[in-house]
Image: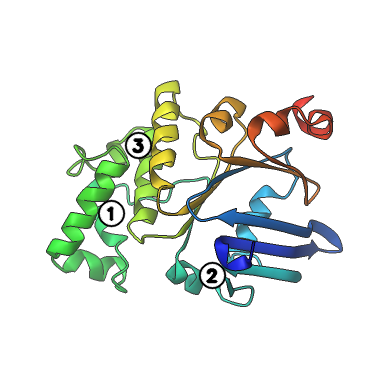
Amino acid sequence: MSNTDFALSVEDLTVSFDGFKAIDALTLYVDKNELRVIIGPNGAGKTTLLDLICGKTKASAGSIKFKNEEIIQVPEHKRVRKGIGRKFQTPSIYENLSVFQNLEVSFPSGRSVWGALAFTATDEIQARVKAVAEDIGLGDKLETEAGLLSHGQKQWLEIGMLLMQEPELLMLDEPIAGMSARERDLTAELLQRICQNRAVIVIEHDMDFVKKIAHKVTVMHQGKILAEGPMDQVQADPKVIDVYLGH
């Protein structure tokens, strides 16, 4: 298989903080339209890996190719423009704006937030906002102030704000933390929908949730990949049971 087949190719990626290798010669390939879940104990380097892929942290060595283009030297904001979206653990939504306005300001129009609010939404933007709102299950909440949404709905809104930019790689760090059981189920459905035309990487601890959503699971340990494959295979791997699932 040539590299051109992958949405993301990470090869021999390393980052050292004060001599400690947080990510140690790690290689990872993610297909287009794949929903990959990364699991592993705390300190395994999962969030650091996402930081390196989105450009928040600079790699010490290795290669990161997005759609077969080397991006290891590309700054974070330019990676966003190329189609890499990243959701952090704490939602960053505009609480005092409506759901519609939150999605509208996320449209990649090259304007600042306040500039974006001043211009009238064109038909294209309105159509895009409505489509994304349906996708994230907030189609009937467009006029609702974001601050009034439930915790789960706020998380979905933030995913929607990323979807407005039509990323081809979307990375989510523990998206169901603090959600109710019902919200978790709806989030599983949402993630399955949105990986139809993009690659999605999710970091998650909840194994039942991982089983529901993962096409493939990558287990990290001490900055390396310990195991990779379908959930059943990974769960039965003695190494994984030893360092992770056994505790």
Which residue position is annotated with label 3?
153
Q: Earlier in the sequence, mark 1 or mark 3?
A: 1
Q: For this rendering, which residue is in front, 104 or 112?
A: 104
Q: Any mark on residue 176, and which?
A: none
Which residue, as the protein is rendered here, is positioned at the far bottom? 73
Q: Earlier in the sequence, mark 2 or mark 3?
A: 2
- 185 over 163 or under it: above or below: above
**Residue at left 79%, top 62%?**
17
Task: Quadrant for the C terminus, please.
Answer: top right
SS of the residue under disc 3: helix
SS of the residue under disc 2: helix
Coordinates of residue 131 in the picture (x, y in percent): 23, 49
How far separated are the C-alphas under marks 2 and 3? 27 Å
**Residue at left 64%, top 61%?**
1
Which residue position is annotated with label 2?
76
- Crowd band around label 3 with a 10 angstrom C-alpha radius: few (<14), some (14–19), many (20+): many
**Residue at left 62%, top 66%?**
3
- 97 over 119 or under it: above or below: above
- Crowd band around label 1 with a 10 angstrom C-alpha radius: few (<14), some (14–19), many (20+): many
Q: Earlier in the sequence, mark 1 or mark 2?
A: 2
Which residue position is annotated with label 1?
103
SS of the residue under disc 1: helix
Q: Is residue 203 left or right of residue 90?
A: right
Q: Amino acid at mark 2?
A: Glu
